[in-house]
Structure formats: C-alpha cells, structure tokens
Image: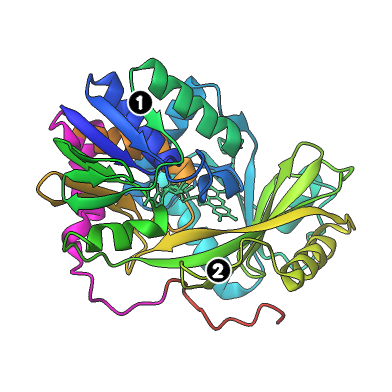
C-alpha cells in the first residue's frame, strides 16, 4: 500500500514510522524543515495525569513508546489550585486518575513545600503530584522519529509544500502523485488542505507562547498552576515557562513571543518560587482546537485521513496516535481501537460548528 503523509511534525512522523514498520510504502511531505511547526516549538511536557479513561489509555501507550525509544526523561509533574472551586476540581481529577491506575497523589500545601523547598506554597489549597510524568526534548523527538521512519523504509521530502488534487492525490510543484491513502497531519493547515477536496473540519488555531529562563539554582518539578494558569518545566538548569494562549488567524500570526508575555511569566515565576531569573529566549507557536477538545484523527473521505486538533497535547500523544492511525489506515488490529474511534472520529462534526478555541478567549492575563 502506498501512503502519503503530509506534515513532518511529531504526529506525521510517528504515523509514517508506524506505517513503514507495517510494510507500507510511505512518503512524508514537509513544506519546510522537520519540526518547523508546533512540534519544534513545544515545551515537552509529557504525562499520564488524565482523569478521562480514554485519555489515560492513550497517554500510557505514548509514554511506553517514548520510554522504549529512550526519549522520555522522568520528571514529576505537580499541578496546584489556589481557590476552592479549582481545588475541588483537582481533588475530583485525582480520584478519577487513581481509578484509571495513574500514579498520582494529593499533597497539602505543607507536604508540597517539604518536597520542594524552593516553591512558595502560600495560597495553594491543594496539589496533585504525578509520579510517572516526564519531559521530552522536542528536537530529539522529531530527529529520532525521522531517523527511525527512514530506517523502516519511509521517504521524507522536506521543502516540499503540497496540496490535494483529489482525496488520495498529492500535488507538489513538480508532480501530481496518486497514493492508496493520504494522511494529513499538517497542524492548522490541515483544515484548508482538506477543504480543497470538499472536507470541512471543525478546527481552530490558537497561539501559545513559551520562554526559557537563565539558569536557576533550585530543584523543582514540572508545575502547572490551575488558578494562575501558567506552567513551567525544568529544562537543563533553567526553567521553560509557558502559556499566554489566545485564538489567532493561522495565516496571520507572530512566531515571536510578546514582551508582555515575557514580563508576566517572569512575574509568575517570582510569585511562585521567589526565583528571579531573566529570560534567555522566547517564542510562540500554533496549537489546534476542536469543539469538544478531543482530536480529529481518522478517515474523512475515500483514501483520506486527518490527524490534528491536539489542544496543546500533540507531542506527548504522538507515538500512540501515530500507531493508532497507521493501524486504521491499513485496517489492522490496534489496542487503542476499542474506545478511541468514536472519541476522535473527525466526522463527528460537520465543520459548521461555532466554538471558541480556548475556554475563555477574553481572559485578562494581567489579572
Ligand atoms: C508553545 C507551545 C508549547 C507546547 N507544549 C506542549 C507540551 O508540553 N506537550 C505537548 O504534548 N504538546 C505541546 N504543544 C503542542 C504540540 O506542539 C502540538 O500538539 C504537536 O506538535 C502537533 O504536532 P503535529 O505533528 O500534529 O503538528 P506540527 O508539528 O505543527 O506539524 C505540522 C507540519 O505540517 C507542515 N505543513 C503544513 N502545511 C503543509 C503543506 N501544505 N505541505 C507540507 N507540509 C505542510 C508544517 O510545516 C509542519 O511542520 C505545545 C505547543 C506550543 C506552540
């Protein structure tokens, strides 16, 4: 079977690898360089702390694959709530996660402070700690997936933007090539690409930002503050701090971080840890959103599949979802097929839905 994969990010490359390992003849088309989309701009958080059983199953599968590829670096993940309604939600999530067999525990503010003295835990009502979480190096993920896909027989063509001439026919600047199947994993560009062949996706883009600080002298976990709505992860001896997300037009956005995001993020670090690092570098990238927050991953037309709508969690899920998609394209058995198809079926929407990419697109970040 000949399969084209459009998009050389973590999802496209994972899909290509899984297809090639199942003996499909795979060609990846990437318009720019590998990882030049969201994948190379991701923070690299990777965890199994999901309250939903299907999300937890996908995460468990993905983490196992990243561990096998030696790409997973263990790093506990702590998330905290500062007001009673967030705290109630965190407690409920932890019970659900424990029911799903995820290695999480609840910590009081004092217990959290004992474990991580560099954290300022004042005002924290409750914390969750995911013991089996970790971090990924996005560049290493992309390079490893590409290397393994090539070793498995895939051809990867970079600097090759494509469009679709028909659902299973790819058009480059030089040629029009029919395939048995096409998988479009082109981030926000997936929507206009498949629109050309009459497929309408319920997909929006939002811009997320991140920065890396100067070195800090502290032992900290990966951290998400559900009330202040920001996160960090240790990166080498520095911190990678992120969020600042807002809905954008994917054809008109700024890949550089906003000065205001940098100031706010450094303030958040100082409020939460008393550390006062400067910013070493900062950037922005595009994430994709769907009306229900679940991805669009599956068949949309004869010979045509899509894989997008990761809601900021595409890197950590990539190897599981790539494997799922490859099995779906080739009609082979897949351990995730029991629950996943309904959840991620891209045709569960007709594409005309009105929705906001983020819960509260008008949120005042300075509040
Ligand atoms: C600041 C930030 C932090 C993030 N942090 C995390 C995190 O900690 N953990 C996590 O799991 N996720 C995180 N994400 C989300 C994650 O980056 C994405 O969900 C994931 O990378 C999506 O991978 P992808 O392969 O689907 O898309 P992409 O990596 O965007 O790849 C799509 C590719 O398609 C190519 N393309 C587009 N159009 C065409 C065309 N016409 N022809 C050929 N190629 C085309 C693009 O050039 C691009 O390389 C973060 C994102 C951002 C921006």
Whether residue 214 appears in magenta in the rendering, the answer is no
Which residue has dot 1 on it? 155
Q: Is residue 51 above or below residue 328?
A: below
Residue 204 shows in this picture: yes
Callout 2 secondary element: loop
Q: Is residue 330 magenta?
A: yes
Is any part of residue 135 visible from this angle?
A: no
Magenta extent:
328-356
Residue located beneath label 2 in the image: 253
Dot 1 and dot 2 residues touching (CB under 8 Å) = no
Q: Position of residue 318 (x, y in %)?
A: 41, 39
Give the image location of residue 63, x and y in percent.
46, 33
Q: How is the image coloured?
A: rainbow
- Picture coordinates of residue 338, whole percent (x, y): 19, 40
Q: Quadrant of residue 228?
A: bottom right
Residue sitting farthest toward the front: 174
- Image quadrant holding the N terminus, namely top left
Where is residue 53 drawn, in percent x and y?
34, 48
311 and 145: which one is in front?
Answer: 145
Q: Is residue 277 left or right of residue 183?
A: right
Q: Which mark is residue 178?
A: none
Q: Is residue 95 above or below residue 254?
A: above
Q: Is residue 98 left or right of residue 265?
A: left
Comparing 229 with 41, the one in front is 41
């Amino acid at each position: 079977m000949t399969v084209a994969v459009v998009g050389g990010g973590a999802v496209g490359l994972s899909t290509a690898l899984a297809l090639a390992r199942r003996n499909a003849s795979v060609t990846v088309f990437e318009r720019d360089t590998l990882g030049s989309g969201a994948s190379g701009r991701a923070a690299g958080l990777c965890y199994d702390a999901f309250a939903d059983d299907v999300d937890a199953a996908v995460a468990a599968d993905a983490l196992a694959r990243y561990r096998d590829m030696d790409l997973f670096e263990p790093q506990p993940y702590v998330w905290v709530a500062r007001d009673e309604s967030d705290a109630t939600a965190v407690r409920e999530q932890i019970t659900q996660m424990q029911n799903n067999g995820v290695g999480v525990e609840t910590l009081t503010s004092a217990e959290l402070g004992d474990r991580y003295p560099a954290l300022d835990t004042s005002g924290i009502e409750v914390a969750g700690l995911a013991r089996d979480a970790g971090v990924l190096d996005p560049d290493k993920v992309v390079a490893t997936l590409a290397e393994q896909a090539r070793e498995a027989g895939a051809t990867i063509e970079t600097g090759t933007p494509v469009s679709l001439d028909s659902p299973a026919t790819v058009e480059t600047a030089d040629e029009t090539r029919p395939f048995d199947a096409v998988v479009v994993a082109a981030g926000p560009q997936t929507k206009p690409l498949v629109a050309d062949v009459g497929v309408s996706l319920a997909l929006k883009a939002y811009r997320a930002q991140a920065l890396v600080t100067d070195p800090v002298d502290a032992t900290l976990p990966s951290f998400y503050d559900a009330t202040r709505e920001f996160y960090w992860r240790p990166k080498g001896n520095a911190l990678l701090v992120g969020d600042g997300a807002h809905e954008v037009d994917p054809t008109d956005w700024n890949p550089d971080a906003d000065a205001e995001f940098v100031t706010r993020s450094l303030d958040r670090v100082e409020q939460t840890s008393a550390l006062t690092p400067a910013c070493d570098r900062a950037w922005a990238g595009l994430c994709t959103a769907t009306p229900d927050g679940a991805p669009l991953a599956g068949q949309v037309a004869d010979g045509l599949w899509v894989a997008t709508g990761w809601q900021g969690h595409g890197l950590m899920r990539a190897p599981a979802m790539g494997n799922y998609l490859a099995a779906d394209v080739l009609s082979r058995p897949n351990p995730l097929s029991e629950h996943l198809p309904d959840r991620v079926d891209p045709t569960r929407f007709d594409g005309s839905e009105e929705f906001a990419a983020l819960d509260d697109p008008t949120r005042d970040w300075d509040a």
